[in-house]
Amino acid sequence: MLKIAVFDHERSAQQLEDVLVRLLFDKCEFGYETYTTRDEIAAIDFERDFRFDLVFIELNAEFFSGVEIAKKIRETGNIRTEIVFTSTDDSYALFGYRLRVFDYLIKPIPIKTISETIDRYFCYCTAETEGFFSFKASGAAQRIRLDDIYYFMSNGRKCCIVNKGMDNEFYAKLNEVEAKLDPEQFIRVHQSYIVQLKYIKGLTRDGLMMTNDLFVPVSQKRYPGVKKQFMKYLGIEE
């Protein structure tokens, strides 16, 4: 079930609810919560109880700070919840980038624009099951074919996708990336690397040689498991 939350003035929240009911009625089962007062927001435990898939947050409300609500969501480590900012202007666009916001809608918002946001959300969330890896970079949702990915590399707060085209960088933890991948297709070989099995050309105790002639290190701790899975992939019994 798709769980949606809206932080807005009561009238605007009701208008958005009416639109979402029209757009989602025939698409999926969904639940909807509105937060229109300071007391309702103060009662939220963002770390334990906030389990929404999609959140619409008004940035120009008088009784709460939309940016602070988004910060509270992200500060708990929650990157699964997609955030949509709504505002009368684009003055908060930089915050949207920093807080990994899915979309930024300027009021008054046409129904067509909300529909396009919902469609992009479904496309983004189902991308992995259709042979794609989805991610957000430069404030926009993007996706790349899984078959084109050689490996993922972590560098601090950023991940890099090394692939057959231009490499892509985005903000995420490698553990989060690993959780979205098929373990029969991708394998964690190092704290900072996840590789696609079919692009491994050779394996030594020092690391992997990939088919694109790049070298990937393998940690000593992970080497036995990597070797076992690689041999299994090749159909070779140890």
Image: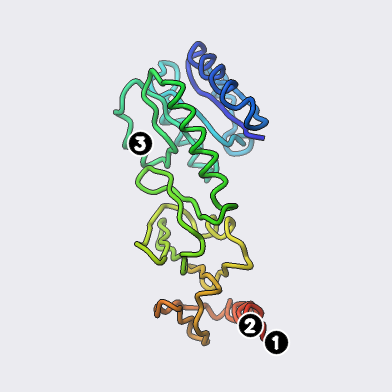
Dividing the picture into quadrants, the one containing residue 29 is top right
Rendered image coloring scheme: rainbow
Dividing the picture into quadrants, the one containing residue 154 is bottom left
57 or 113: nearer the viewer: 113
User: Where is residue 112 drawn, in percent x and y?
Assistant: 45, 25
- Number of residue marks: 3
Residue holding disc 3: 95
Q: Could you tell me the amino acid type at mark 2?
A: Met
**163 vs 202: above or below:** above
15 or 207: nearer the viewer: 15
Residue holding disc 2: 231
Of the numbered discs 2 and 3, the one sitting upstream in the chain is 3
Q: Secondary structure at mark 2?
A: helix
Q: Secondary structure at mark 1?
A: loop
Camera-side mark, 2 or 3:
2
The residue sitting at the top extreme is: 11
Q: Could you tell me the amino acid type at mark 3?
A: Phe
User: Where is residue 144 drawn, in percent x and y?
Assistant: 45, 56
Residue at the image point whose x is 59% and y is 25% from the top: 43
User: Where is residue 73 drawn, in percent x and y?
Assistant: 51, 37
Q: Label 1: few (<14), some or many (≥20) within 10 Å? A: few
Say left or right for 152 vs 21.
Answer: left
**51 vs 160: above or below:** above
Label pair 2/1, CB-CB below 8 angstroms: yes
Disc 2 from disc 1: Cα separation? 7 Å
Q: Which mark identifies residue 237?
A: 1
Q: Secondary structure at mark 3?
A: helix
Residue at the image point whose x is 54% and y is 55% from the top: 176
Q: Could you tell me the amino acid type at mark 1?
A: Glu
**43 vs 191: above or below:** above
228 or 132: nearer the viewer: 132
Camera-side mark, 1 or 3:
1
